[in-house]
Image (tube, rainbow, N blue to C red):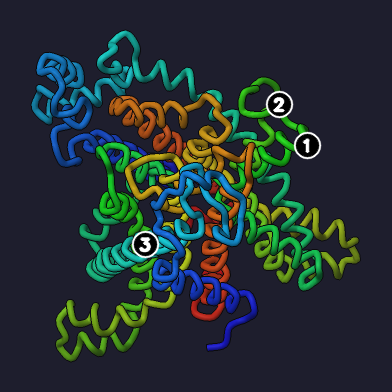
Amino acid sequence: MSAGYIRRRIFGSLIAIFGVSVLVFLLVHLIPGDPIDNLLGEAADPVDKLQMRVCMDLDQSLLIQFGRFIKHVFDGTLGVTCPDQSRTVASLIAHALPSTIELSVAAMIVALVLALPLGVIAALKPGSWLDAASTVVSLAGISMPAMWLGPLLLSIFYVQLQWFPGPADQTGLSALVLPAIMLGTHLMAMLARMTRSSLLEVLSEDYVRTARAKGLSNTAVVVKHALRNALVPVITVAGIQFGSLLAGAVVTEKVFARAGIGTLLLEAIAQRDYRIVQGCTLVIAVSYVSVNLLVDLAYGLADPRIRVQ
Amino acid sequence: MKLGAGPKIGAVLIAIFFALAIFGPLFAPYGPEVQNLDHLLEAPSHAHWLGTDENGCDLLSQLLFGARLAAGISLAVVSLCLAIGLAVGTLAGYVGGLIDESIMRFVDILLAFPGILLNLAIVAMVPSAGVGVFVFALTVNGWVGYARIARGQVLQVREREFVSAARALGAKPGRIMLKHILPNILSPIMVQATFGFAGVILVEASLSFLGIGRIHAYSWGALLSQGTTYLWRTQHLAMAPGLCIALVVLGCNLLGDGLRDRLDPHSK
């Protein structure tokens, strides 16, 4: 892979991250009205208001505020929470993030494990009832709102069948199953559709016909030749979507009352703690950009044609 | 234009949705916020076809008013996103150079916010965010998808002979973009708008479900959230709004797939 391509891609991501930081910083300022009035209410005690203003650096010029915001990004603290200044935003996020990453990884596994066989079976028997069934499952997965699927899963598998633990129990792998299905279903449906169309396309390629003409078995043709190529774009999209899972975890964590960055964000919103809202938004967005960059670079390594494009 | 069975079903679902959004509230048996404290959390009956919620409000009436709200917000957001996306994307693609580069970098920044994150952050920052804030928040990053597609299309179309001919005849850039390029790039954009409509319905419902902003209590997401609270006692409260959202999104997806196959087969 050319050094120029890597440099260009990293530079583009750094610009995106900088832009995201500026936008997240400006969020508080773009909203009409005084942020402190929004936070504490117009009738709040002037002393409290002043303390909050100083704590949030809102008594400084916009340039100094931005400088401090960037400084807090680089020193890794993301600033202290206000008015309780004993905690840094980063420490709260660091405490919440592992649970969200665990959930997102589990959702990704659910999505891939279900999507690949579903898409492959549909592509190998196009027009059959298996293909039709796979299409129905994919369409249902894409159309069903996650915030409906989650409670339904809880109602069936926790309340009625009691196969999996409910929201109160968060220990062990079994507690991850239902939230992972809720979060991963949409991605599963998307990937199943992609796998089907990608494999169908590859199966009509000349090299697959050549492999068949050589007398290879159908399994060998599909597994060794077709699938390897058909899955490259599918895995790439899966990688790129990892960041979306982090954001989607907000709804899942609410439904399953799981501690995580989504719950932290919602609590901060309820308490109107702008610093935490900014911190969570920034961390999720930067993770998203970084994962995209890594996936792009890995894709470039795997498929030289991408670099030319 | 002939459509397959799937897209036809999609078109019917969308047509029913809009018919309910326009006429439904006229035929709603009760007001959306009329409480009947003698009929709390009742199962579907003759008087209340879809049952009542914990305040005794009629669920069917709430869903019908909610349909109008969802249709209004989604139409407003998709129209705004289409207008902004088409204008920005066409400008970037036609003019090129520094303007194109700056616009696309800005688009990249907005695309760096995954899923509903940016919408959520914006609505969360505004105290008592109403419908207007929802529309604004969903439009802020909603237009970028349209802009990207429009730009890509313009890059192809601007090299075609009829554009060169218009330029040679002395047509001004504004006229070329509006009269010659725009009509020729609309197909993939309309496909995107169909999927985009489903996306807006889902995001709006998600934000209401999370209880962010102060939109009406009968928005579909808020009804679903309320229904899930009582899932342990009764299922109908969560079933109906969930099914409504799913059917509209399914309709958009089916119709979008059909339109894409017909209008824009290359992007399949």
Residue B41, position as x, y percentages in the image: 56, 44
Q: Amino acid at mark 2?
A: Leu
* Tag 1–tag 2 contact (CB < 8 Å): no
Residue at the image point whose x is 50% and y is 26% from the top: A260
Q: Which residue is mark 1?
A: A161
Q: CA distance from mark 1 to mark 2?
A: 18 Å
Residue B207, position as x, y percentages in the image: 41, 45
* Label drawn at residue A173: 2
Chain ID at mark 3? B
Asked whether, in this view, residue A289 is left or right of residue A227, the answer is left
| Same-subunit check for callouts 2 and 3 | no
* Tag 3–tag 1 contact (CB < 8 Å): no
* Label drawn at residue B225: none
Q: Residues within 10 Å of mark 3 (few under 14, many from 20)?
A: many
Residue at the image point whose x is 25% and y is 15% from the top: A83
Question: B214 above or below B249?
Answer: above
State which tag comes first along the sequence, 1 or 2.
1
Chain ID at mark 2? A
